[in-house]
Image (cartoon, rainbow, N blue to C red):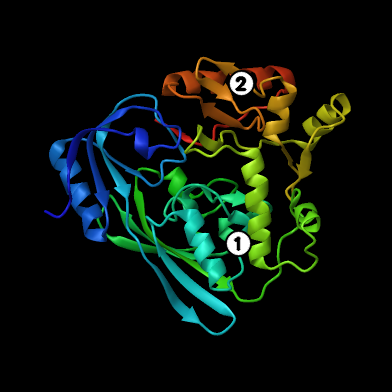
């Protein structure tokens, strides 16, 4: 047996909220065979298998009666390179931001707007991570996943992943697939996405008229660092609520009442509202009760000031949801997985 199985392990170091709950069993997977072995062990022990990456999309509210398997596989490979288009493959356990930085050092364009997002490569397709006008699906090629039901490996292309806003097949069928490695189609020369948020303004402030992908990445990193707390210093899971999609009629009524409403019309006729703006308007920005709170600079981020429990953070989230529903007739959906 190559898998090192541990019992009664604190998960505080393995979730970005820093919530101190315990797992009855814990192991790390460095190879595909470790994942298969963990599946067998969980069945033998009579407990579920919970697979985690960087723990940046989790809110743990109780001790975990499961075998918690942390994906720790490493490796980045160039599969194809025709001088312009480059096909890369990265193992699930690779940390996301260092992977993005690696692509930039190779002179590749495509992932720069997704800089400084926490988590791992393997977790990125589950949420179809996105930021500053780019989503993972825009550079995605395919992935390899293990079917928990059959134990077989399967390759998924872009269409089969059924990506949507912060959603995918793997989120909707969360109990079935374990992502092992992901492939990306990047380019050496491609258009940069500069028109979402303050990206172009930040580049201009730095005197950069003709930016490179690395310039864009650095600008986005500086913006994110100003607005979002570092989980190593202040426990959080990044954006805690999805930006809600509402009808054009509701958006129109809200805009009449609140002229500063931040809204983005969508191609399907719906309107995406900025959840952070709604939360700030409702007065929650900077709120703190015990060690559970809302970040003082970004209302979309719930934070653990030290010893907040999962239930305390979850209760705060539900109070915010109820308040936003009452004030704006808008339902906020929680983005992290609550366990």
The residue lying toward the viewer, choosing from 285 and 262, is 285
Horizontal arrangement in the rendering, residue 276 relative to residue 51 (left or right): right
Q: Is residue 62 left or right of residue 287?
A: left
- The percent coordinates of residue 137 (x first, y second) are 57, 59
Q: Nearer the viewer, residue 235 or 66?
A: 235
Q: Is residue 41 visible?
A: yes
Q: Is residue 72 left or right of residue 316?
A: left
Which secondary structure lies at badge 2?
A: helix
Q: Residues within 10 Å of mark 2 (few under 14, many from 20)?
A: some
The residue nearer to you, when weighing 234 against 7, is 234
**Which residue is at the far top?**
289
Give the labeled residue for mark 1. 138
* Relative depth, front residue between 215 and 192: 215
* Placement of 84 over or under 58, stated as above or below: below
Instruction: Identify which residue is drawn at 44% across, 52% down.
Output: 120
> Label 1 neighbourhood size at 10 Å, few (<14), some (14-19), many (20+)?
some
Q: Can you identify the residue that label 2 sits on?
A: 320
For residue 31, what is the image quadrant?
bottom left
Give the mark nearest the N terminus, 2 or 1.
1
Between the residue at mark 2 and the residue at mark 1, the CA separation in whole angstroms equals 32 Å
């Amino acid at each position: 047996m190559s898998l090192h199985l541990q019992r009664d392990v604190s998960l505080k170091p393995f979730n970005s909220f820093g919530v101190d709950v315990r797992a009855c069993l814990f192991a790390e997977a460095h190879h595909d065979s470790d994942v298969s072995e963990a599946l067998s062990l969980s069945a033998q022990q009579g407990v579920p298998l919970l697979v985690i990456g960087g723990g940046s999309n989790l809110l743990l509210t109780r001790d975990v009666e499961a075998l918690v398997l942390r994906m720790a596989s490493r490796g980045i490979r160039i599969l194809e390179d025709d001088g312009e288009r480059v096909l890369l493959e990265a193992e699930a356990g690779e940390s996301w931001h260092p992977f993005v930085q690696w692509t930039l050092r190779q002179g590749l364009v495509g992932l720069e707007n997704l800089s400084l997002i926490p988590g791992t490569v393997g977790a990125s397709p589950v949420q179809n991570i996105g930021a500053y006008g780019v989503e993972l699906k825009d550079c995605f090629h395919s992935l390899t996943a293990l079917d928990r039901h059959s134990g077989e490996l399967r390759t998924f292309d872009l269409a089969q992943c059924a990506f949507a806003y912060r959603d995918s097949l793997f989120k909707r069928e969360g109990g079935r697939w374990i992502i092992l490695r992901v492939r990306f189609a990047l380019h050496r020369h491609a258009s940069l996405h500069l028109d979402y948020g303050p990206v172009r303004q930040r580049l201009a402030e730095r005197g950069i008229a003709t930016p490179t992908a690395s310039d864009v990445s650095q600008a986005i990193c500086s913006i994110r660092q100003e607005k979002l707390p570092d989980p190593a210093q202040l426990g959080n899971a990044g954006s805690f609520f999805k930006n809600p999609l509402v009808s054009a009629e509701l958006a129109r009524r809200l805009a009449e009442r609140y002229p500063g409403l931040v809204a983005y019309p969508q191609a399907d006729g719906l309107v995406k509202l900025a959840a952070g703006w709604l939360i700030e308007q409702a007065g929650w920005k900077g709120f703190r009760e015990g060690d559970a709170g809302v970040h003082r600079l970004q209302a979309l981020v719930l934070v653990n000031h030290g010893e907040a429990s999962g239930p305390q953070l979850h209760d705060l989230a539900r109070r915010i949801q109820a308040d936003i529903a009452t004030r704006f007739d808008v339902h906020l959906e929680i983005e992290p997985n609550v366990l």
